[in-house]
Image (cartoon, helix red, strand yellow):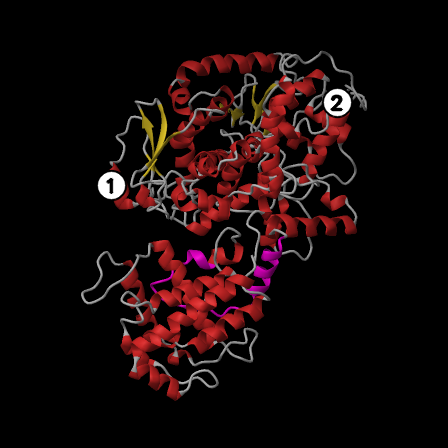
Amino acid sequence: MPPMTGGYVNWRLISISCDIEYARLRAGRNALRPGFDALVRHLSQNPRAALRPAPRKRGAPRAVVETARGPVCTAKTGDTGKSESAMPKRPTGVPAKKVVEFPAALWDVTVDPVEFHDALDLQMRRHDDSWGHLHRAIVRPGDRINAKTLYSWKTGFRVPRTLDSLDILKRIECRYRLPAGYFQSKLPNRDRAPAGHQLPGVAPSEQRRLAWHLPDDFDSRSAAEREEILTWVRDVIISGSTDYRRFQAAAMKTRYALRFKGLQGKSRAHRAAVHQDAHVDPDLVGRSRVAPARLQQEMADLVRFKTSTLTAVGFQRSGVWGDETASQKIEHLALLFGALAADPEGPVKGLGIPAKALSFGMLVFPSIWDWYIQWREQRRGFYTAWEVDMLRLASAMTRQETGWLRQNASLIDRVEPVDGLLSVHDIQVAKNDWPSACDTFCRYALSRVKEVERVARVHRDPFEPILPILEADNPVGEYRKITEEILKLMPNQRRYPRAAAESVRAFLMMRIGLHLGVRQKNLRQLLYRRRGESPTSERRLIEAKRGELRWSDREAGWEILIPAEAFKNATSSFFSGRPLRLVLPDLGNLYQFIDAYIETHRPALLREAEDPGTFFVKTVKMSSTDAAYGSEAFYDAWRLIVQRYGIYNPYTGRGAIKGLLPHGPHNVRDVLATHILKQTGSYEQASYAIQDTPDTVAKHYGRFLPQDKAALAAEILNKVWQTA
């Protein structure tokens, strides 16, 4: 039967089933309708041909048609009465078909359908099961599923979405002797967690995060097993079970950093709590206290001094801060002043200086810095590179000729005494000879840097979340498994366009990130141009400090151009003032996905929101109109991809890599550098993959262990014995 609604042909369902554009099909409906009417009349008069029960005997026969809502009996043959919806009934006197536990198949399947409803319909016909008979065969006392549900599955109007529905699928598989998971593997949206988990005492927001990572039989397991699964999911997938993350979780409970309005971005505060690849302190989370107006003005003067294009008349400086560097330094100083103002009796155990008494002039006194770095050591348990960086910042501000503090002697007038650390005499001495006070502090800071460096420890292992990948012989190939998992679980685009768009976006994030090896800022701010559109000029890209994905007619491929000015290390010898230009290889249908994303999936994500012009855009919800990715939103998107597709879950069997932990896009640079080091042993070639210098790779990115070096040398030497 053709799909009908209210006695009329449902053209929309036909367009979906036949993969024909709805507008074109509707335009030609007048030419097609007579054929469908003839088909309905024929099947109404020949119920056996329609595989439907015969019309009831009383009165004129009614045409039984299938609709999206189930069978519908239309107007009586030869009658003009109104149509009515009703379940088709078995003819009077005909006994019900006997239920057989394992019916024999009538024929062998040569072509296995891809769609779920096609596969279910085929297996039902193959085993001579109607949807009503199948319902009687598999239903159990207490089941809340009815026969109409099976019919809606068979016709493709609905698909199983709950745990109870998935259990019914398992019974059907068992009845037809099909492999376990046969029907579930054909569901159009395997990327969606089934509904129905019972998690008493867990907030709905956490239930949504946990649902995807719980096995389908979670509710039927013992209490001990359920607790074990929940603990594993929370520790490994949701939070990440590293020592640094545990420290972050504890540090988030005591917030003390000051907030400088109009100067600090909102991004780094969130990254401090969740990002393993961000060199920021977790105490930055929740900067609830606003700095006093005088201190905010001093901070604004410092930022203006270090970020302006030209130095103000009468001042000298050495080096300029970019946006990211300025944001980082502001937050570092916000922590320092926050610690000085924190309550000594509170959990932070600060110094207790009144906020109104804080001033940058205090930073030229060694006693203040000695208290701060020792306070940090007591809080964390050891010294880190953080204290070294802060001391270097302070020494730069007091340097001869170019130091900002040295050139602002009036700051000392705002300094007030601090019990036990700063006396009136100390302040007066500094007022009398400000340059000498700056020289004294500069010598102190440089000396302390050497002392702290000697005992500083690494507070986190940046490689820990991705150790299983870095330890593989082919790190990039191992990381690529995440993209394969995304494709394996990709939803049906026609039925779930937005979910499919999110999967394609996740796939392209990973693929382009692995090809480029750039920092997340350059990746999330990447612009794009369609095929045939004129690319943006390099001068405009330099002004915007952004790269662009465009089609290159000369190379016949998708090209990415990023000006050197867009990179954090723009002055590195790698660039020499020239842009990064890379043609993406058309491997693994990459071009096909890029074209589909630009033409179909990206508009599905944007909906009615304003287009920010970037290649990657957020999924726009009804409550938001901002489609541009911020730094924390992009990090969270990447981390969610790793949680869903990357981390192997032994309880569900999903996930690509055993032992992987949540991480952000920055770790891709570690993967690329380590891969090339393992293949070539060259730090210089590894630096080419991440647009940096060999020294930077050796210090921060490449995990090239002695055994890797020995194995690479042995591979060359062993060739001598193979040819002997």
**Count of numbered badges drawn on the protein:** 2
- Locate the N terminus by quadrant: top right
- Looking at the rendered structure, which numbered label has been put on residue 176? 2
- Looking at the rendered structure, which numbered label has been put on residue 424? none
> 262 or 36, which lies in front?
262
In the figure, residue 471 lies in which quadrant?
top right
Give the x, y percent position of residue 414: 32, 81
SS category of the residue bearing label 1: helix
Name the amino acid, label 1: Arg
SS category of the residue bearing label 2: loop
368 over 589 or under it: above or below: below
CA neighbours of label 2 inside 10 A, class few (<14), some (14 to 19), many (20+)? some
Label 2 and label 1: CA atoms lie apart by 63 Å
Name the amino acid, label 2: Tyr
- Locate the C terminus by quadrant: top right
Which residue is denoted by mark 1 in the rendering? 540
Q: Which of marks 2 and 1 is nearer the N terminus?
A: 2
Indicate left or right for 228 with 537 as reference. right
Q: From which residue to which does the magenta span run? A: 242-269
Q: Residue furthest bottom?
A: 425
Q: Mark 2 or mark 1, which is nearer to you?
A: 1
Indicate left or right for 545 with 505 as reference. left
Magenta run includes residue 93 = no
Residue 288 visible from this viewpoint: no
